[in-house]
Image: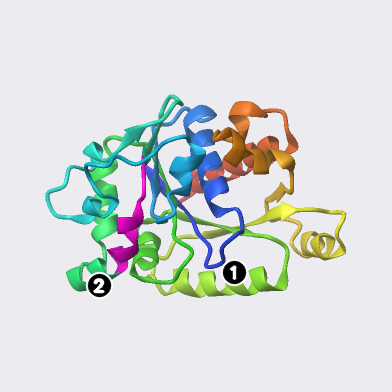
């Protein structure tokens, strides 16, 4: 089992869309039993998959001793893909983990899920706090979506510092140029400066995810964006194979 965190300290970079589509690729292309764990209070992953969180249990209860995580998990419309959805209770999770004082609580929960899933994809909150720190300790790989802009480059430096501060054996980081539009000079410069980074093009199909409430591969499999995300997933699997 391997866990992948999709993380950025900057909002509006396509983080949730990328997390949902990578989880779909894991389940559909690699045919791996996959859990998408939404840790962002906005519950964007659930929305994009057409799923609302269960009302009986709050999302933060996943971190309470004795909770059966599988009872919080919801099946999606796609084979091999499950969702552990978020809700507003996640907003207080940072304070709860601080009080708990267990720095590897999330990592322990991930270990417990290893017998049920081949891949876990985290849709991380766009903040620096105890939740993000615990994700870094639990992840085997960190994906950082970066729209081509000076602010995004600065945000990437913050993420690198955060990941390196998570411990001596911190996970590798894979930056991804997102919403790339080569008609723009700034975007071309960013691509030329980082030719080996994976890139996801700016495309209407990406925006349509929120309208269709489906992964791109499910409704536009031949689109450039779907192909780019599939190629990114292949690169992720290769990277995980060398860990």
Q: Position of residue 143 (x, y in %)?
A: 54, 55
Tell me, yes or no, whether the highlighted magenta stretch contains residue 90.
yes
Tell whether label 1 touches label 2 (CB within 8 Å).
no
Magenta segment boundaries in residue numbering: 84-94
Alpha carbon distance from label 2 to label 1: 25 Å
Nearest-to-viewer mark from 2 and 1:
2
Foreground residue among 225 and 103: 225
Q: Residues within 10 Å of mark 1 (few under 14, many from 20)?
A: many
Foreground residue among 18 and 108: 18
Foreground residue among 2 and 10: 10
Which residue is under mark 1? 156
**Picture residue at 22% right of the left edge, 45% below the top:** 57
**Picture residue at 28% right of the left edge, 35% below the top:** 116
Task: Locate the N terminus and report the quarter of the image it occupies.
Answer: top left
Foreground residue among 76 and 197: 76
Q: Residue furthest front?
A: 55
Instruction: Give the number of the disc on residue 98.
Output: 2
Q: Residues within 10 Å of mark 2 (few under 14, many from 20)?
A: few
Q: In this picture, is 221 found above or below 69?
A: above
> Which element carries disc 2, helix, strand or loop?
helix
Q: In this picture, is 143 found above or below 238?
A: below
Instruction: Give the number of the disc on residue 4.
Output: none
Q: In this picture, is 199 found above or below 105?
A: above
């Amino acid at each position: 089992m391997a866990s992948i965190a999709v993380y950025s300290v900057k909002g509006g970079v396509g983080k949730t869309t990328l997390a949902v589509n990578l989880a779909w690729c894991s389940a559909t292309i690699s045919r791996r039993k996959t859990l998408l764990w939404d840790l962002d209070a906005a519950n964007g992953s659930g929305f994009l998959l057409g799923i609302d969180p269960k009302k009986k249990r709050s999302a933060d209860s996943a971190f309470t001793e004795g909770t059966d995580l599988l009872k919080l998990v919801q099946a999606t419309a796609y084979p091999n893909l499950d969702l552990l959805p978020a809700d507003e209770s996640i907003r207080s999770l940072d304070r709860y983990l601080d009080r708990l004082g267990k720095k590897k609580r999330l990592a322990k929960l991930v270990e417990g899920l290893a017998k049920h899933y081949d891949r876990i994809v985290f849709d991380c909150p766009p903040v620096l706090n105890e939740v993000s720190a615990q994700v870094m300790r639990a992840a085997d790989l960190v994906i950082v979506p970066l729209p081509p802009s000076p602010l995004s480059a600065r945000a990437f430096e913050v993420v690198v510092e955060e990941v390196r501060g998570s411990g001596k054996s911190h996970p590798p980081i894979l930056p991804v140029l997102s919403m790339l539009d080569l008609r723009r000079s700034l975007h071309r410069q960013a691509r030329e400066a980082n030719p080996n980074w994976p890139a996801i093009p700016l495309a209407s199909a990406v925006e349509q995810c929120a309208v269709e409430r489906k992964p791109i591969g499910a409704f536009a499999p031949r689109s450039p964006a779907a192909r780019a995300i599939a190629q990114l997933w292949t690169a992720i699997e290769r990277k995980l194979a060398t860990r």
